[in-house]
Amino acid sequence: MQKKVLLTGDRPTGPLHIGHLFGSLVNRVTMQDDFESYIMIADVQALTDNFNNPDKVRESVLEVAMDNIAAGIDPKKTTIFIQSQIPQIAELTVFFSNLITVNTLRRNPTVKAEIAEKRDLFGSDGESVTYGFLGYPVSQAADITIVRADVVPVGEDQLPMLETTREIIERFHRIYDVNIFPRPEAKLSESPRILGLDGAKMSKSLNNAVYLRDNPEVTAEKIKSAKTDSGSHVSFDPAKRPEISNLVMIYSLIHGIKPQEAVSELATLSYANFKEKLAADLNKYLAPLRAKRAELEAKPHYVKEILEMGRKRVLDKAEETMSLVRAAMKINY
Ligand code: TRP
């Protein structure tokens, strides 16, 4: 039987952290056996809000590739590629831009929230938002459809992008009277979202993340100085004690147990002792991944070859998709 097609993407704006690991990488690794899998490094999308910082994007491309492979993505099973290396995605974005209204893009809750966060770039009221940033969901629709993906593993914040993608596909099919693309469905991760070490969203810009590439000493230091409350024993109550509960959540993810089980294992420990144990266990859990990552760092040529292989594979499929699209739109001169 023909395998279904899976595509997901990472914006290369920095190395990946344990939030990415538990939230998405672990799932990708399991799913790569059952799907024709693609992981796209979304450098073009990253540039929509980092156009003034191309070095950051450039440097992060290999980081993100290495993080994925170190976490267990097998280049034989999964095609890893760089978005900008597939010009057909840009071409398809232009055609798709006729099929969605500016008002729909303006209402996209994720885009809206991002515009509000990025005052320095887009103005205090979003009055300076660029055409490129407002339109990145259209480009994301092209990412997904260029390989004719069925399944798109993403976080909840990406659901509006999938809706836009389906709307564009439906219009395309209706207007040009074809049926080229499957209806792509989001696949939400089942593992609970973990927070940063200060209780806010885990994010590079907030400086509250444990990176896959951090060494054990840095990891231990970060866990030691993680925010907690004035309680004296470990408990799990995310509403009342979000920070300590988050640490318990990380512990339970490492050990594959429920937070309540973790609490009974840890009940006798002080916060300080729990943190020491958590740091040791996390370092142990990450050790094989970090060893693999160190190996990859020592041979960047190998990683570049994988990306080159990915480029070639996707290029063939993208050309196939574009012949169908150009024929449907009567621009196959
Ligand atoms: N927007 C996604 C994110 O910020 C990254 C992404 C780009 C993506 N293209 C994609 C995800 C295509 C899924 C499918 O995480």
Image: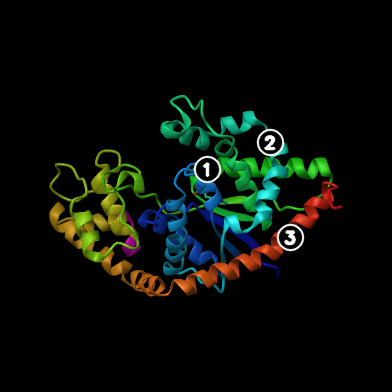
* Residue highlighted by disc 1: 48
In the picture, the disc for residue 155 is none
Which tag, 3 or 1, sits closer to the chain's start?
A: 1
- Return the x and y of residue 151 as percentages of the image width and height: 61, 55
Instruction: Please name the amino acid that badge 1 sits on.
Output: Thr
- Point 80% across, 41% down: residue: 174
* 161 over 277 or under it: above or below: above
- Of discs 2 and 1, which sits in the foreground? 1
* Residue highlighted by disc 2: 100
- Point 55% across, 43% down: residue: 159
- Of discs 3 and 2, which sits in the foreground? 3
Q: Which residues are magenta?
A: 254-259
Q: How many neighbours does mark 3 have within 10 angstroms: few (below 14), some (14-19), or many (20 or more)?
A: some
Q: Secondary structure at mark 2?
A: loop
Instruction: Please name the amino acid that badge 2 sits on.
Output: Ile
Residue 199 on the magenta span: no
- Return the x and y of residue 217 as percentages of the image width and height: 21, 63
Here the colouring is rainbow
* 102 over 36 or under it: above or below: above
- Point 44% across, 71% down: residue: 300
Q: Quadrant of residue 8?
A: bottom right
Tell whether circle 2 marks a residue whose Cβ is less than 8 angstroms from ligand 1.
no
Instruction: Please name the amino acid that badge 3 sits on.
Output: Glu
* Residue highlighted by disc 3: 319
